[in-house]
Amino acid sequence: DLLVVGSANADLVVGVDRRPGPGETVLGSDLVVHPGGKGANQAVAAARLGARTALLARVGDDAHGRLLRDSQREAGVDTGGVLVGGAPTGVALITVDPSGDNSIVVSPGANARLTPEDIQGAGALIAAARVVSVQLEIPLDTVAATARSLRPGTRLVLNPSPPAPLPDEVLAACDPLVVNEHEARFILGVSAGGTPEAWAQGLTALGPRSVVITLGAEGALVADTRGDGAVHVPSPRVDAVDTTGAGDAFTAALAWRLGLGEALAEAAAFAVRVGAAAVTKEGAQASFPTAEEVAAL
Ligand code: ADP
């Protein structure tokens, strides 16, 4: 089974002609509310592919929390680990201007209250998982507690997004660490230059057992310390409409296939197809493909 430990947010989206300045009010389009957050996105992406998936997250006792639980259940996710209360559900306040540029304010809300104690309280869920997938929209202490809670043989997949400095014990537990170009540069502390091969080498030196770097339309580069050298996994060529959520779909698919026992390059070859399918549709969760849609790509 796949367990996703992470965030759940309501994305509140309003279109505007232009952004308000300080003290100014502008009128926007009708509000659209989408379920989002990287944890919730990954769980839906995996379940839609057919993976047995559970989500460990925290939402508020409010309408956004119910929206998130409903969308998880509809996708087939086990929501027994979705804790309720402590703060309002996390929200992302998103304005979109006519050129398509987003301005986003995130209020983490209940996501910031997912604690190491919550991880300890979820022993049965964690024990049932072959793979546990985490991101950084929850407290770093909680991510570290998750890494420490794993039984031998359970794999940790970490997408450090939004990027933050990672403790050595967390880096050492990653198998793999999954980063895009921006996250790779952040963790390596390099602002420009370099090649994906060089980043993979640099990241591997930080301690994870394996590394995956996603490269947008170029697919992904995978490097396993138990294998020989980095392997480039190309993405199918598609007409990209909206890349929102592509990384979440990729990581969920990768984590699921690793749990089925596939080798890293094999799992990545499936995951790039899932990521590519996700960019052919608008939205995040709404764009995630079924297994049939991946096969048809
Ligand atoms: P993120 O969304 O985290 O920035 P990427 O942009 O690297 O991550 O995308 C993740 C995966 O989604 C890629 O590895 C690839 O498989 C797929 N993908 C993203 N953009 C495209 C694209 N334009 N064409 C085909 N596949 C894409």
Image (cartoon, grey):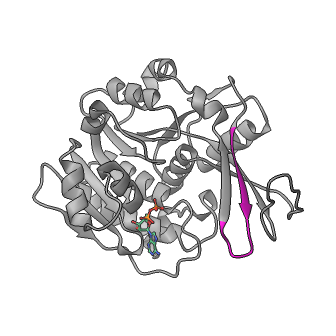
Where in the figure is residue 267, as x and y percent of width and height?
31, 58
Is residue 278 left or right of 152 when viewed as pictured? right
Which residue is drawn at the image coordinates 24% and 51% (left, top)? 203
Name above or below for residue 123 compared with residue 216: above
Is residue 289 left or right of 105 when viewed as pictured? left
Range covered by the magenta-colored residues? 90-101
Where in the figure is residue 45, as x and y percent of width and height?
52, 54
Looking at this view, is 4 or 146 the one in front? 146
Q: Is residue 94 visible?
A: yes
Which residue is drawn at the image coordinates 79% and 38% (left, top)? 63
Quadrant placement of the N terminus: top left
Q: Can residue 175 be found in the magenta stretch? A: no
Is residue 259 left or right of 160 when viewed as pictured? left
Which residue is drawn at the image coordinates 35% and 24% (left, top)? 149
Quarter of the picture for ligand 1? bottom left
Which residue is drawn at the image coordinates 26% and 48% (left, top)? 261
Looking at this view, is 5 or 81 the one in front? 5
